Image (spheres, rainbow, N blue to C red):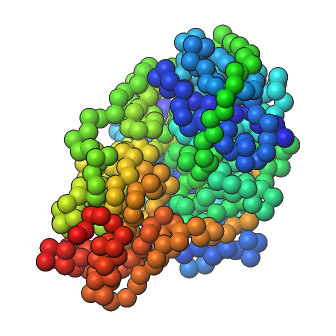
Amino acid sequence: MKTLLIGEYREGKLLDSTYELIGFAGQLGAETALFLVGSESQLPAYDGALYLADALACGEYNPDLHKLLILDAVERENPDYIVFLHSSYGWDLAPRVAAALRVAQVSEVIGTRDGGFEVGCCNGKMRRSVKPATRRAVLTIQAGAFQGVQPGGTPRLTRLSNDSAGSVQFVGYEPAEAKGVDLAKAEVIVSAGRGVGKKDNVQIIAALAKALGGELGASRPVVDADWVAHDHQVGTTGQTVAPKLYVACGISGAIQHLAGMKKSDFILAINKDKDAPIGEVADVLVVADLMQFVPALTAQLRK
Amino acid sequence: MKILVCIKQVPDLESRFKPDPNGVWFSDTDLAFRMNEYDEYAVEQAVRLKEQLGDAPEVTVLSIGPDRVVEAIKKALAMGCDRAVHVQDPAVHLKDPWQVASIIAAYAKEQGFDLILTGMQSQDRGSAQVGVTVAEQLGIPCATTLVGFSYQDATVTAKRELEGGVKGVVKLKTPALVTCQLGLNTPRYPTLPNIMKAKKKEICAVAVAQLLKAEPLAQTVSFHPPAKKGSGLVLEGDVCDLVNKVIGILKEKTAVLR
């Protein structure tokens, strides 16, 4: 079995997540070749075939062109699986490659099961196993689902180039908004999720944070609804945190949130839904109504 | 200008899911359904663009599924879409993303839309494939995961959400397709007068067989709950007892309470 792994490069740097692809291929017991639109002056240590296109010439984001370059590498390498990270780069590019090859794509793979690839569904509450019906398939793997493996060695380099322009013009990056709150430094974070119900209830969560001497965090829906400012957001697109104590209040546990907090030393979750995916990472899951339990806990802590 | 918005009806994600008799998707019984959250942002953006251009564009909303999806279609019409297409398919949940995309592409091809908007993914299946695949099948430019959108002179300027709060700004010429991320805008609530007006709008029903020509490329072989990795303690019961238990545990297991 052979895999072509699609590495990622952003703002001049190879992303560490690229090594998760190598970890995944290792779990499959597959041979690997690596594809990268990057820089020859910054090659990863790697002991196999590396197909490299120059990011200065091809752009870090140019999906039409990157698709053509990958198709070129597929032609030369003849892989069974073409594997991307399920990231803003991967989920954007993978379906284009799959469509060009007319092969199956399985998105956000977390493992193998029942003769197929296991993926999450229903907001992380359930799983499906999906089997490609085509000999070759495109996969995207869930960020953080596979341990990164950093190989040694010197890559056998094949340079790829292509002159086509592409129909999506990349203008530039816009940096993340300045952080007012550095959650990464907090020892305790108490986060509000959609389960708080309305903006007025956020103060009940903030009061618990204060009683525990911690900071207020929030999940994405709460930030999107403007109940809490963006700089409090925990998750893939917000801040990644690992406090001594993380309290998740009314957070169901979407994968993007879990990725931002699952390395916390101790996780206490309060949720009325016993089956919420937050239970998978929580040390203690309290099944209760937030509006009863949280004020009672805060009052007891203040004594 | 012609705009197409593609929406999906999904179950309330707070529900408990049980496998259907085939064991490949959830059973529909006892579930409440609503419009996929990502698609609400797509509908809102389409309606805003229509308003920006002096109401000139016609906005069509399309959904594939059984009769119940008409409820989601009605909401989109009440939010401001002009007309609707219901692709009738009681078995859409058994189709793979390639087939779903081919149904939409087959419809869109004949209509000549200038702009197609979809959610970046569905909340229930979450493959994030259908939007991009529609664009590839139609051969039009596509940008995904939009948290910013502007339109001028047949050009879309889009802000894509990347990891860690960074955004990537891209431009694409219409005809084009964009997929919408949460937070792109603030989807409006349909007002009562608009709900009444929506009742008069056309919902055109099309049998899926007229549009579907593609064979599936992948197959779901099982639907199951996660293997319980969480070795965590689950506490239930009286609130006062719970508070005391939790404080006891925090004192014992963490260094933050002394």
- Is residue A272 left or right of B220 when viewed as pictured? left
Quadrant position of the C terminus of chain A in the picture: bottom left
Q: Residue at x 19, y 78 (%)?
A: A300
Above or below, B47 against A54 in this view is below
Q: Quadrant of residue B149?
A: top left
Q: Residue at x 28, y 55 (%)?
A: A187
Q: Is residue A221 visible?
A: no
The x, y position of residue A285, in whole percent, is: 42, 74
Above or below, A60 against A1 in this view is above
Above or below, B198 against A61 in this view is below
The x, y position of residue A291, in whole percent, is: 26, 76
Q: Is residue B233 visible?
A: yes
- Is residue B106 left or right of B163 when viewed as pictured? right
Q: Say which of B33 and A160 sits in front.
A: A160
Give the number of callouts: 0
Q: Residue at x 62, y 67 (%)?
A: B226
The x, y position of residue A14, in whole percent, is: 54, 26
The x, y position of residue B8, in whole percent, is: 56, 56
Q: Residue at x 54, y 75 (%)?
A: B16
Q: Say which of A276 and A103 sits in front.
A: A276
Quadrant position of the N terminus of chain A in the picture: top right
